[in-house]
Image (cartoon, grey):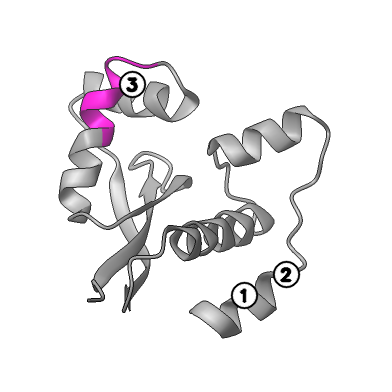
Amino acid sequence: MSISKWCVVYALVNPNTKEIFYVGVTTYKVRARINAHISQSKKRATKKDIIIDELSKVGKRPLCKILSKRKFPNYHRPTMFNMETFWIKRLYKDGHPLVNKRCTEALKKGRKINVDSLQSFKKKFL
């Protein structure tokens, strides 16, 4: 029996600057995932958490933008993460100040984020 699930790739947007600062993927309701980010931000200290916590201190929350939504006939985590990676690369290429670990770790090590495969992935999955 195959299980179909919606996969949603979303972006967190700073309401002050209107810049996308984080890209995530979920199979849950997006509002619940955003609420989880907000409650996690009080306990952790990643760059994403710091931004969310600073917004919370002044009564704001990140805005959410749906980047991609797709239903898969089988729950397939690698494809979900490939979709997320596609958007991280695309938005990074477009100059958004992303704080996703994949971006910051690659840049710390002096590596560029490879954006060459965007077109072929887009045709296959989006």
User: On the picture, is 18 further left or further right than 123?
Assistant: left
- Give the residue at mark 2: 117
- Give the residue at mark 3: 54
Q: Disc 1 to disc 2, how far (Cα)?
A: 6 Å
Does the magenta run of residues contain 21?
Answer: no
Number of disc labels: 3
26 or 46, nearer to the observer: 26
The prevailing secondary structure element of the residues shown in magenta is helix
Label 1 vs 3, first from the N-terminus: 3
Provide residue 34's location: percent of width, then percent of height.
24, 43
Q: Amino acid at mark 1?
A: Phe
**Which one is closest to the eye, mark 1 or mark 3?**
1
32 or 48, nearer to the observer: 32
Find residue 3 and report its image quarter.
Answer: bottom left
Which span of residues is magenta-colored? 37-44
Find residue 43 and report its image quarter.
Answer: top left
> Label 3: few (<14), some or many (≥20) within 10 Å?
some
Identified at 51% across, 78% down, the residue is 125
Q: Amino acid at mark 3?
A: Glu
Provide residue 104's location: percent of width, then percent of height.
64, 33
User: Which residue sits furthest front?
Assistant: 1
Q: Amino acid at mark 2?
A: Ser
